[in-house]
Amino acid sequence: MATTPALDDALLDFTSRENWDKFFALRGDGDSFEWYAEWPQIKAPLLSLLLGEEGTEILVPGCGSSSLSEQLYDLGFRRITNVDFSRVIVADMLRRHARVRPQMRWRVMDMTNMQFPDGSFDFILDKGGLDALMEPEVGTKLGMKYLDEAKRVLKLGGKFACFTLAESHVLDLLLSEFRFGWDMTIQAIASEPSSKSAFQTFMVVMVKGKMGVVHTIKSLVDQSAEYCNMQQANAVIHALQNENKIRESHNSGVDILFSLRDLQLGAIGDLKVIVPGRRRQLILGEQGSSLYCYKAVLMDAKNQTETFAYHCGVFIVPKARAQEWLFASEEGQWLVVESAKAARLIMVFLDSRHASADIDVIKKDLSPLVMDLEPEYPEETDPMPFMMASDGVKQRDVLQEVLLMF
């Protein structure tokens, strides 16, 4: 039976393994705890996702002492793997279920660093796990690590169901991290009329699809319905409307300026694969992760049958030459790609922000940013070359790998 937490909120750091161990130890053995959205409220929407799929491999990350897994098991879903980083709760859950539910699996594991092979599960069921990682003081780092892991272990076509309070910082992360290649639906979970909860629970469902495809979010949150927290529900509706505008712009055919994170998430498909003639504009770097931001263009050579000197290279264009036809026009940029003899070329444009920076500092700042844009090429062992156009003032013999002159 669900009860209120036994620990003062000030004592419980939701991201601390030690504090969770203390929390569960104080509650004692055999006690189930639900933060929100109890089984009677989530049963129907959850089973609609699992209908006729009793053989589904289900992962429950951050399982805690919730009764959710046992409810599913008793309905015929035997292939359930529960993970939590608290040894205290995993030991307790094993004692409770080992005999009566022998096929259920329990693992002591950090859900931000799971030890499962890629594509291990058909269904991931998160009930408050992401919310617990997204403490405002911590930021998005742990949440992003967890979502990256969840995506990795989920099979193509698999479903990720996340029960969440959909606070703005959590919802923003979900919407952006599942923007490319995922079909997303969100609905509000009905509350009991007698419920004293001050918060509305939502179920966000993401279906893993093809990289680069952008789907409009299907909202089952009705603005005219009655929710236990109308302000919360209206905030979700507003966020979905804004996100769908972003998604519509990606489907409009307009030349979008992507972020590096967009590309890492699959906005233009698999970055490890060369796509002849592909050209995308992007921004490299962001505050806190690099010294500078850079406008860049990623280009995959149109003719991939020729012999290339490099499978990938970086070409730096100084501010003094950025407006020349050769570098400012798409036609001219393709000529640069051809001259560079690279299967993929990342053109980086310097501007007034970089005027006082030494080129070695620029190169060092760019190096970790462009690594994620490098295609897979098993035979290539040499470092990615940095090339540069002359600035028209003097020879800058500072990029040792390659120096191109135009």
Image (tube, grey):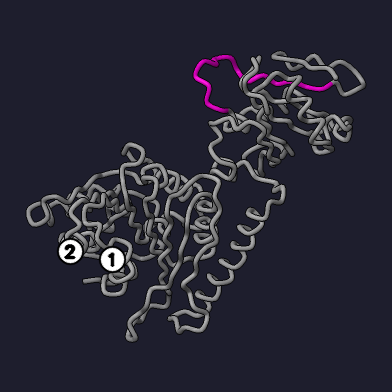
From the image, tell me which residue sits under label 2.
Answer: 75
Q: Position of residue 71 (x, y in %)?
A: 20, 64
Give the quadrant of the N terminus: bottom left
Tell me, yes or no, whether the highlighted magenta stretch contains residue 388.
yes
Residue 350 drawn above or below residue 246: above
Q: Position of residue 391 (x, y in %)?
A: 87, 24
Which residue is depicted at the point 28% across and 49% down?
83
Q: Position of residue 153 (x, y in %)?
A: 36, 43
Label 1, label 2: how many angstroms apart (C-alpha)?
Answer: 10 Å
Q: Which residues are magenta?
A: 375-389
Tell me, yes or no, whether the highlighted magenta stretch contains residue 251.
no
Dot 2 alpha-carbon crowd within 10 angstroms: few under 14, some 14 to 19, many 20 or more: few
Q: Position of residue 183 (x, y in %)?
A: 47, 56
Name which residue type carries label 2.
Answer: Leu
Residue 227 occupies quadrant: bottom left
CB under 8 Å between discs 1 and 2: yes
Tell me which label, 1 or 2, sits earlier in the chain: 1
From the image, tell me which residue sits under label 1.
Answer: 47
